[in-house]
Image (cartoon, grey):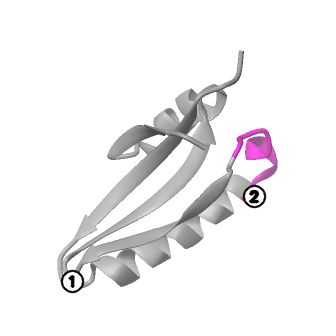
Amino acid sequence: MKSKQIQLLWDFRGPNSEPTATHFLEHLIQYLRKPENLDIVCNNSGTTVHNESWCSTYINTTSESLEKLKIDLKPHRGVYIDI
């Protein structure tokens, strides 16, 4: 069975939401590069500016990596995605 693709998101709000989301993405990439996390699937990551006071950081992953990411990083929300 093919694993489900999931997008995990962290939302940042306020006048500094964009630089905060960009900074969080840097930490997220550092987390994924740690030797103990190399088995985590990351298909894509980035930031999305929704408006001047709301920006999100995201990672696209699989259902197999979900539990570790939820425990370690506590995403604000997640959605299933079609690829």
Q: Sequence-wise, which precedes: disc 2 or disc 1?
A: 2
Position of the N terminus by quadrant: top right
Q: Residue at x 59, y 28 (%)?
A: 4
Asked if residue 15 is positioned above or below residue 64 in the image, the reply reads below
Q: Secondary structure at mark 1?
A: loop
Mark 2, residue position: 33
**Front position among marks 2 and 1:** 1
Give x and y (percent) for residue 44. Answer: 63, 57
On screen, residue 40 versus residue 78, left or right, reads: right
Residue at the outermost front position: 83
How many numbered tags mark residues here?
A: 2
Q: Observer-nearest residue: 17 or 3?
A: 3
> Is 52 placed left or right of 10 in the picture?
left
Q: Which circle marks residue 2 in the picture?
A: none
* Mark 1, other Cα within 10 Å: few <14 / some 14–19 / many ≥20: few
Residue count near mark 2 (Cα–Cα under 10 Å), binned few <14, some 14–19, many ≥20: few
* Residue drawn at point x = 41 percent, y = 42 percent: 74
**Residue type at numbered disc 1:** Glu
**In the rendered view, would you say 16 is above or below 29?**
below
In this orientation, which residue lies closer to the viewer: 65 or 80? 80
Magenta residues, start to end: 33-41
Q: Which residue is mark 1?
A: 52
Residue 13 falls within the magenta-colored stretch: no
**Disc 2 residue type (three-letter):** Arg
Residue 35 in magenta?
A: yes
Identify the secondary structure beneath mark 2.
helix
Query: Is the C-beta separation of discs 2 and 1 under 8 Å?
Result: no
Distance, label 2 to label 1, CA atoms, is: 31 Å
| Image location of residue 8, percent across then percent down | 46, 46
Q: Position of residue 35 (x, y in %)?
A: 82, 49
Instruction: Place residue 17 in its image quadrant.
Output: bottom left
Q: Residue at x 71, y 41 (%)?
A: 40
